[in-house]
């Protein structure tokens, strides 16, 4: 029983490390993007990590502004991969590369 608890804890620590590394990579990509091109909306990767919580809170409070900001943060984190791995077609659809 003690071994299972230890293994679960190790697994959770590894998951947390991966999440931290993911946020750091996002921040690095954002800095690189800002240095080389037009500035994007001021939403840091650390903020979009919690955007789902902000979206839920905004929905509960019926705060349209908070919902919009959270949706924008979520969308910006998805857009990077969608642009990198899909080809946009003239009819508006996408094909996976």
Image (cartoon, grey):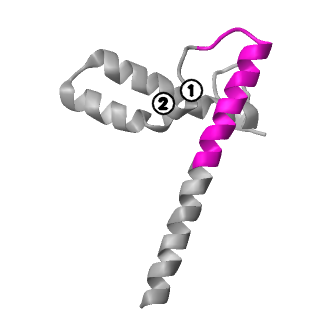
**On the rendered structure, is 24 left or right of 11?**
right
Q: Residue furthest left?
A: 61
Name the secondary structure under disc 2: helix
**On the rendered structure, is 81 left or right of 71?**
right
Q: Is residue 26 above or below residue 7?
A: above
Residue located 76% across and 15% down the image: 35
Residue located 34% across and 23% down the image: 67
The image's mark for residue 76 is 1
- Dot 1 surroundings within 10 Å: few (below 14), some, or many (20 or more)? some
Q: Which residue is mark 2?
A: 47
Instruction: Tell me residue 34's x, y (percent).
Output: 71, 16
Q: Is residue 52 above or below residue 65?
A: below
Q: Residue furthest bottom?
A: 1
Q: Quadrant of the C terminus?
A: top right
Q: How many marks?
A: 2
Start-end of magenta stretch: 20-40
Instruction: Tell me residue 33's x, y (percent).
Output: 73, 20
Residue located 69% across and 38% down the image: 25
> Disc 2 vs disc 1: which is toward the camera?
2
Q: Is 71 in the magenta?
A: no
Name the secondary structure under disc 1: helix
The answer to whether one can see residue 82 in this image is no
Q: Is residue 26 above or below residue 39?
A: below
């Amino acid at each position: 029983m003690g071994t299972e608890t230890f293994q679960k804890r190790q697994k959770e620590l590894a998951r947390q490390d991966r999440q931290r590394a993911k946020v750091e990579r996002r921040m690095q990509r954002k800095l690189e993007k800002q240095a080389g091109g037009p500035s994007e909306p001021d939403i840091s990767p650390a903020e979009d990590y919690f955007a789902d919580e902000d979206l839920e809170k905004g929905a509960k409070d019926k705060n349209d502004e908070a919902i919009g900001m959270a949706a924008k943060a979520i969308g910006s984190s998805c857009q990077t991969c969608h642009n990198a791995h899909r080809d946009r077609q003239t009819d508006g659809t996408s094909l996976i590369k």
